[in-house]
Amino acid sequence: MPLVLASSSPRRQELLRAAGFTFTVEVANVPEVRRQGEDPISYAQRLARDKARAVLPRHSAGTCVLGADTVVVAGEEVLEKPSSQEDAARMLRLLSGRVHQVTTGVCVARSAGGSLPDCEEMRAETTQVWMGEISEAEIAAYVAGGEPMDKAGAYAIQGIASRWIARIEGCYFNVVGLPVPLVYRMLRALGCLACGGAEGER
């Protein structure tokens, strides 16, 4: 079955390709606005579902669409992509020297040939991340380099920020942007790997 990734994230695309998936990419232009009182897991799952459903009507029956959204939670605050360099620096100060959670909501929807899926599943993965102390000079240099600007929580665990990650508990790929083992299980459960998926590819 054809697989479509409803995301422009290069990290998610790289992770899927590295795991042997064949897919196309279509961007879902969905407003990322958290509702009042919405907890982080529900928020990430809702955005993942909205992204999948935004792309789904463009495809014929049997097509599987994968939507995902990642948020970082520090204490009571949900950290998404920074709006400015100042916002990125603020987030990094908040994360410095403490543990935080990274949650990715995932939705797999299979098209019935219309606007609604014939089957759909939503899940979420959460990883605990321990961040070491980051000095003001390090934060300034990191932000100036541009790496934090399109990342939830203003850092990339697979990039320069790896030097500050003391340890993690849970799925590493989730922190990068997509919990690949969970995605594989979901696609397999919904019958989305019969063809065009990861099985048998190297």
Image (cartoon, rainbow, N blue to C red):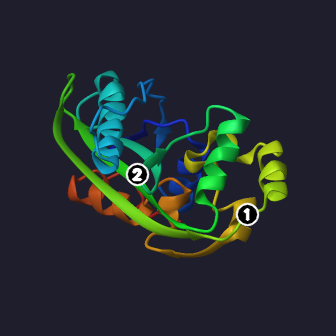
Q: Residue at x 51, y 53 (%)?
A: 177
Going from the N terminus, do you reach mark 2 or mark 1 first? Answer: 2
Extreme-left residue of the structure: 118
Other-residue count near label 1 (Cα within 10 Å), few / some / many at <14 / 14–19 / ≥20: some
Q: Residue at x 50, y 54 (%)?
A: 16
| Viewer can see residue 133 | yes
Residue type, numbered disc 1 = Ile
Taking 3 as reference, is 180 above or below it? Answer: below
Q: Position of residue 52 (x, y in %)?
A: 33, 35
Taking 91 as reference, is 169 above or below it? Answer: below
Residue 184 placement, left or right of 25: left
Other-residue count near label 2 (Cα within 10 Å), few / some / many at <14 / 14–19 / ≥20: few
Q: Position of residue 40 (x, y in %)?
A: 35, 48
Q: Residue at x 31, y 50 (%)?
A: 41
Residue 187 placement, left or right of 147: left
Q: Quadrant of the N terminus?
A: top left
Residue 85 placement, left or right of 112: right
Q: Which mark is residue 76?
A: 2
Q: Which mark is residue 134?
A: 1
Q: Position of residue 94 (x, y in %)?
A: 59, 54
Tag 2, which secondary structure? loop
Distance Cα–Cα, label 2 vs label 1: 21 Å
Nearer to us in this view, 155 or 86: 86
Q: Residue at x 43, y 27 (%)?
A: 28
